[in-house]
Image (cartoon, helix red, strand yellow):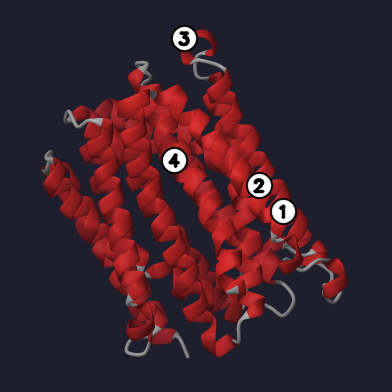
Amino acid sequence: MTLARIIAIAVLAHLVFVSVRLTGSLYALSNKASTFTVGVLMALFALVPMLIAVRAGRWLDEVGPRRPAVLGIGLILAGVVLPAAFPYPVADIAPLLVAAALVGTGQTLAMMSVQQVVGERTDPERRAAAFSWLALGGSVSSFAGPVASGLLIDSIGHRATFVVLVLLAAGALAWVWAQRPLLTHAGDRAAPPVPLHPLQLLRHRELRHVLIATAVISMSWDLQTFMVPVHGTRVGLSASEIGLVLGAFAAATFVVRLAMPWLSRRFTEWQVLIFTLFAACTAFALFPLFGGVVTLAVVAFVLGLGLGAAQPNVMSLLHSRSPPGRVGEALGMRTTILSGSHVVLPLVFGAAGSVLGAAAAFWTMALIVGGAGAAAVRWQRAAP
């Protein structure tokens, strides 16, 4: 029951986050924003986290997750207020850009806090199962957010959808405030050792491999969130249909994470990650070949089966391979690497999509993920 209450914080924060990303991108596209502009918008969700994640991780190690979690949800609420308060015809894209930075930063703080609590409150042998439940919560929010947002956009419009998200974010803030006794603070924790330079963490070979693999996986996750609305808009899908395609991806992540306790007894973490990378490679190669909502949903489901299997294993490896007392720093380093790729990826593929089309972005990512899968095969053989 305690674990469920903690996971609920992550679910509420992530629900708002994914809804803002879809609603914001479709809001901009509906007002004739270019693919590159939408790429800038998506990049801002990760820009500030890229810059502060390691320092935030050290702060998390020092004070515990309570204050970072409350601050994170507060930033999410502040972010969603802006596009709800300032209409696009008056303020242009500026409120969306500021909202992206605030919501992305808040989501990072909230998720790092929850991940630390889940890792510390579970026994090492049950850690993968606990992170599977956390990942299942993420699947629920990943499904509900795009589907509900798409339906709301088609029925009440983009700005009114942001008003709904304001109410949801306010409820999330009330929930995390009510659950703060479950979040440990500095008085409950031993003083952390002197922080390492971030590059020193990368000297740990297995930790480095985990960070590289999870960076590529998160790039894949981010690309589908960014390019599926662009591709869907270009082939004439409605907001509801685009939401259903993204919902099919989220449904697949839920299915595979529900099966993860069974899978983890039969496959090693690296075997799961190899499957993840090659499944993503296949799905990205297929996306540009289809334009119907059903076929795109099937491809998205395949992608979700692959990417959804990764997170519990990655987080378990991250906690077990991190130096003692530096889990927060390792989480921060992971977030910095992921956010850096999230900043670069939308800009690069947004520009490429404007010039070469969405197909070039999907196929380039397929090559990147396929190469990472081949590297992961070697890493598995070298792992103890």
- What is the secondary structure assignment of the residue under circle 1? helix
Measuring 52% from the left and 77% from the top, which residue is drawn there? 130
Q: Is 195 positioned to the left or the right of 38 in the image?
A: right
For label 1, the crowd category at 10 Å Cα-Cα, with few meaning under 14, some 14 to 19 and many 20 or more, is some
For label 4, the crowd category at 10 Å Cα-Cα, with few meaning under 14, some 14 to 19 and many 20 or more, is many
- Residue 37 can be seen, yes or no: no
Q: CA distance from mark 1 to mark 3?
A: 36 Å
Measuring 26% from the left and 58% from the top, which residue is drawn there? 303
Tell us which disc is closer to us: 4 or 1.
Answer: 1
Residue receiving disc 3: 89
Q: CA distance from mark 2 to mark 4?
A: 17 Å
Q: CA distance from mark 4 to mark 1?
A: 22 Å
Quadrant position of residue 77: top right
- What is the secondary structure assignment of the residue under circle 3? helix
Q: Specify the amino acid type for callout 4.
A: Ser
Residue receiving disc 4: 19
Tell us which disc is closer to us: 2 or 4.
Answer: 2
Chain-order first, disc 4 or disc 3: 4
Q: CA distance from mark 3 to mark 2?
A: 30 Å
Chain-order first, disc 2 or disc 4: 4
Q: CA distance from mark 2 to mark 1?
A: 6 Å
Measuring 51% from the left and 43% from the top, which residue is drawn there? 16
- What is the secondary structure assignment of the residue under circle 2? helix
Residue receiving disc 1: 177
For label 2, the crowd category at 10 Å Cα-Cα, with few meaning under 14, some 14 to 19 and many 20 or more, is many
Task: Out of 156 and 366, give the one closest to the viewer.
Answer: 156
Q: Specify the amino acid type for callout 1.
A: Trp
**Label at residue 203:** none
Q: Do labels 2 and 1 touch, CB within 8 Å? A: yes
Measuring 73% from the left and 62% from the top, which residue is drawn there? 65
Q: Specify the amino acid type for callout 3.
A: Pro
Tell us which disc is closer to us: 3 or 2.
Answer: 2
